[in-house]
Image (cartoon, rainbow, N blue to C red):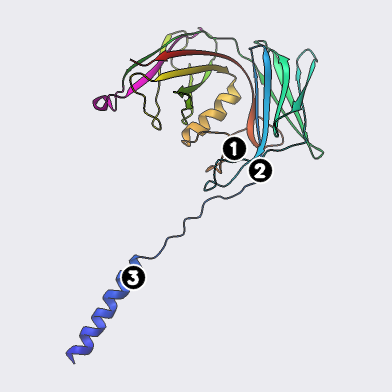
Amino acid sequence: MKNPLIYFMLFAFILVITSCDKVIDVRLDSETDRLVIEGNITDVLGPQTIKLNTNVAVSNTNTYPPVTGAIVTVTDQGGTVYKFTEGPAGTYTTPKMVGVAGNIYTMNVVINGKTYKASSIMPQLVALKSISSSDSRFNSSDGTRKITVHYQDPKGVANQYNFLMYVNGARVKRVLVNNDDFTDGNSVSFDLMEDDIGINPGDKVIVEMQCVDKSIYTYWLTLMQQNYNGPGGGVTPSDPPTNITPSTLGYFSAHTTQTKTITVK
């Protein structure tokens, strides 16, 4: 009688062990082939660019199919229409255009008879005074550095900022935004915290500071809160609030831009 009991207990033990090895199927939102629009108008005279592609699943490589054959224009508030021509595939440019602070710009994209529109107002320029490097507060023991931007926020005006940072030519993935809800009219020193590259002495760092309107700030802030790094490279937990109608992935931004470069010490 002992042997059957032992066999039964052994069988039960094996059943428990094998059940612990069960593969868990994690289902991710895999809605793909959605239109992504990345539109940027800046206050620098030269080519302005609007990119059209379709998104891919999170697990796919960073290759995003371009959307070709679209009709793309931008109209300023004075009624001047700028036509964008395609080249390379999915990238539409106008050769000579400069945005003016305070002006409203409206994008119009027609794809297969369907029209997408968005408007953005270009804010006033807030000067980027300088950028600096110092020991990272989290990783000071390993010699890594943090980058800080310095600027004077105008008093009595709502301002929103988007920052792009490049380390030795590679763009930092993390979205970096700030506003003046608690710093209106103050001299601001804002740390650009990143965790995907690691900044060390001798590195060349370029920071671009964009003054963006409220809707674009909300868009980038939402992506930052999702710890995401781009407008259409993959499927996100939820779509950020776009300013494009009808709703699609991406944004249209009229913003000022300026850059500064340092060699990290």
Mark 1 is surrounded, within 10 Å at the Cα level, by few (under 14), some (14 to 19) or many (20 or more) other residues, namely many
Task: Give whichever of discs 3 and 2 has the lower sequence position.
Answer: 3
Element class at badge 3: helix
| 78 over 9 or under it: above or below | above
Check whether the beta carbons of the residues at disc 1 and disc 2 lie within 8 A of each other: yes
Distance, label 1 to label 2, CA atoms, is: 9 Å
Q: Is residue 121 magenta?
A: no
Q: Nearer the viewer, residue 142 or 130?
A: 142
Nearer-N-terminus badge (1/2): 2
The region drawn magenta spans 136-154
Q: CA distance from mark 3 to mark 1?
A: 40 Å
Q: Pointer 3: residues within 10 angstroms few (<14), some, or many (20+)?
A: few
Q: Residue 34, labelled with which disc?
A: 2
* Residue 261 in sight from this viewpoint: yes
Q: Nearer the viewer, residue 83 or 212?
A: 83
Q: Residue furthest left?
A: 2
Q: Position of residue 51 (x, y in %)?
A: 67, 30
Tell me residue 64's x, y (percent).
Answer: 62, 40
Residue at 54 percent across and 33 percent down: it is 230
Out of 193 and 240, give the one closest to the viewer.
193
